[in-house]
Image: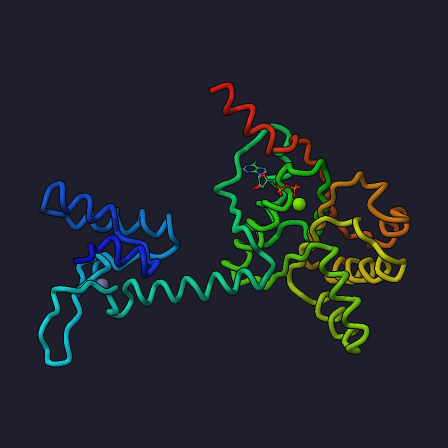
Amino acid sequence: MERIGDILAREKYPQNTENQKKSSETKTMTDQDIITGCEEQKAKFGYASNPHCAVCRGLGSVHPILPEGKTDYSQVINCQAQGCIVDQKSIYESTEAYIRGKGVSKFNTFDSFKPVLGAEDTLDAFKDIAFNPDAPPLLIVYGTTGNGKTHLCEATVIELLKRGVDCRLWAVSELLSNLKESISQNTTELLIGRLKKLPALILDEWGQNYGSEWEEQKLEEIVIARDREGLVTIITSNLEPDKMMEDPERLISRFGDRTQARLIRNKAPDYRPKKKAKRSKG
Ligand SMILES: Nc1ncnc2c1ncn2[C@@H]1O[C@H](COP(=O)(O)OP(=O)(O)O)[C@@H](O)[C@H]1O
Ligand SMILES: [Mg+2]
Ligand SMILES: [Zn+2]
């Protein structure tokens, strides 16, 4: 006979291992154990059973009831009670797809961002925009590759969406290919119009892969229009500000007086080799 764990693994559902472990260890589970187990599952997988579920008592799995009304003890399925694991999984998956559609691919969060030396101002500025509706809306962050800029862009998008602020994270090169594609479909103005009005726009890796002056002009047009409206715009780049565009003075001179633009250098080094160095020390 198949074990519960195997069935759940095959079905790709998280098993409430905490609960099961506690159950086999002690045979009696307090309500608090169940709640803690569910919280741990949710933190790990993004969804869990309902600890207060009257059907599965928070375990997330039940024996199915056969059409004639008898319980089939030979099988285990995920609990389909309202608000329990099957519901939670589908809510989680629709949310995940929604966030992916906003340009997030790695689901990096502020929680998983280590407060490294040199990234203090950068982290503060991203958090300010993510959590504070009155933060200065224009933020430009530059610094060496691998020091967490894209990570913080993703974290910010996730938080803004939680707050109900519609936003989109674009790698600039990707946005530019969309812009180019839009020409043949005659939708360029529509796309640019939308980008000018979106409550928050995050343009990652600015200053690379520019094919033409037209592209640079369109990007500038979008940023300047957003600045005028006071809409949240974040730009990141691996380049020094004077290398970010053909004529940085032109862009800067066109920002309105009331602009409280922040230009921040992320001084943290590339995070990736640092991880290795840490490991070899420990
Ligand atoms: N302070 C940090 N804490 C945790 N992970 C980090 C940190 N900085 C960078 N990383 C990780 O290092 C990798 C490279 O970072 P990334 O954000 O892509 O760099 P950038 O966009 O600045 O080139 C990513 O996997 C990211 O999650
Ligand atoms: Mg990046
Ligand atoms: Zn249940």
Q: Is residue 98 left or right of residue 192?
A: left
Give the residue furthest to the top: 281
- Image coordinates of residue 4 in percent, x first then y, are 21, 56
Q: Nearer the viewer, residue 201 or 20?
A: 20
Q: In this rendering, is residue 200 above or below 146?
A: below
Task: Name the residue at 24% across, 53% down.
Answer: 5
- Image coordinates of residue 252 in percent, x first then y, are 85, 49
Q: Nearer the viewer, residue 114 or 209?
A: 209
Q: In this rendering, is residue 73 above or below 14?
A: below
State how the image is colored. Answer: rainbow
Task: Name the residue at 30% across, 49% down.
Answer: 39
Give the residue furthest to the bottom: 68
Q: Nearer the viewer, residue 141 or 91?
A: 91
Tell me which image quadrant ligand 2 sits in.
top right
Q: Quadrant of the N terminus?
A: bottom left
Task: Tell me which corner region of the image, top left, top right, bottom left or bottom right, holds residue 94.
Answer: bottom left
Q: Is residue 69 left or right of residue 90?
A: left
Report the number of numbered marks: 0
Task: Name the residue at 52% across, 24% down.
Answer: 278
Task: Name the residue at 20% across, 63% down.
Answer: 76
Q: Is residue 203 left or right of residue 217?
A: left
- Image coordinates of residue 262 in percent, x first then y, are 72, 44
Q: In this rendering, is residue 196 above or below 169?
A: below
Q: In this rendering, is residue 256 above or below 281?
A: below
